[in-house]
Image (cartoon, rainbow, N blue to C red):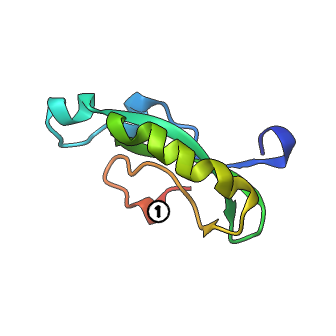
C-alpha cells in the first residue's frame, strides 16, 4: 500500500510498460504512461496506470480524477506489457 491507504496496482516506468511491444517506434513515441486512482471491487482506493496517446492523457486524467471518491469500480488498471493481457496485470 502507498500513502493514505491507497493500494498501488501498478508502478511501472514507461520503458517497462512498452518493453517487448512489437509496435512501430512512431506509435511508441506518441504514448505516455499516466497514473490514475479509482475505487476497486474491494471498495478501497487503488492507483493504477494507463498507457495512452499523449493527446488523450489530460482528458483521461480529468475523467479519472473525480472517480477516486465515487463508486466507479475497476478490478485493476495497469498497462499491458510483455504480451500479458490487462486482466493478468496485478
Badge 1: few (under 14), some or many (20 or more) residues near its Cα, within 10 Å? Answer: few
Label 1, on which residue?
Answer: 88
Residue drawn at (37%, 47%), measured in percent from left and top? 81
Q: Quadrant of residue 42?
A: bottom right
- Where residue 30 appears, x then y in whole percent? 26, 32
Residue extending farthest right: 4
Q: Against 15, is 9 above or below? A: below
Residue drawn at (59%, 66%), measured in percent from left and top? 74
Q: Work out whether residue 53 can be spotted.
A: no
Residue drawn at (18%, 41%), measured in percent from left and top? 23
Q: Is residue 53 left or right of residue 63?
A: left
Q: Quadrant of the C terminus?
A: bottom right
90, 3: nearer the viewer: 3
Q: Against 33, is 49 above or below? A: below
- Where residue 31 appears, x then y in whole percent? 32, 35
Residue drawn at (42%, 31%), measured in percent from left and top? 14
Q: Quadrant of the N terminus?
A: top right
Q: Work out whether residue 1 can be spotted.
A: yes
Q: Is residue 37 left or right of residue 22?
A: right
What is the count of numbered marks?
A: 1
Q: Against 46, is 42 above or below? A: below
- Where residue 6 appears, x then y in whole percent? 77, 48
Per the image, label 1 sits on a secondary structure element best described as helix
Q: Quadrant of residue 41?
A: bottom right
- Where residue 60 appears, x then y in whole percent? 48, 47
Amino acid at each position: 500500500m502507498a500513502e493514505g491507504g491507497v493500494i498501488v496496482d501498478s508502478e511501472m516506468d514507461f520503458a517497462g510498460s512498452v518493453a517487448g511491444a512489437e509496435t512501430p517506434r512512431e506509435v511508441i513515441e506518441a504514448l505516455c504512461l499516466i497514473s490514475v486512482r479509482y475505487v476497486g471491487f474491494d471498495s478501497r482506493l487503488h492507483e493504477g496506470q494507463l498507457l495512452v496517446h499523449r493527446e488523450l492523457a489530460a482528458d483521461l486524467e480529468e475523467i479519472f480524477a473525480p472517480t477516486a471518491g465515487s463508486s466507479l469500480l475497476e478490478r485493476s488498471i495497469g498497462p499491458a506489457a510483455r504480451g500479458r493481457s490487462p486482466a493478468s496485470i496485478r
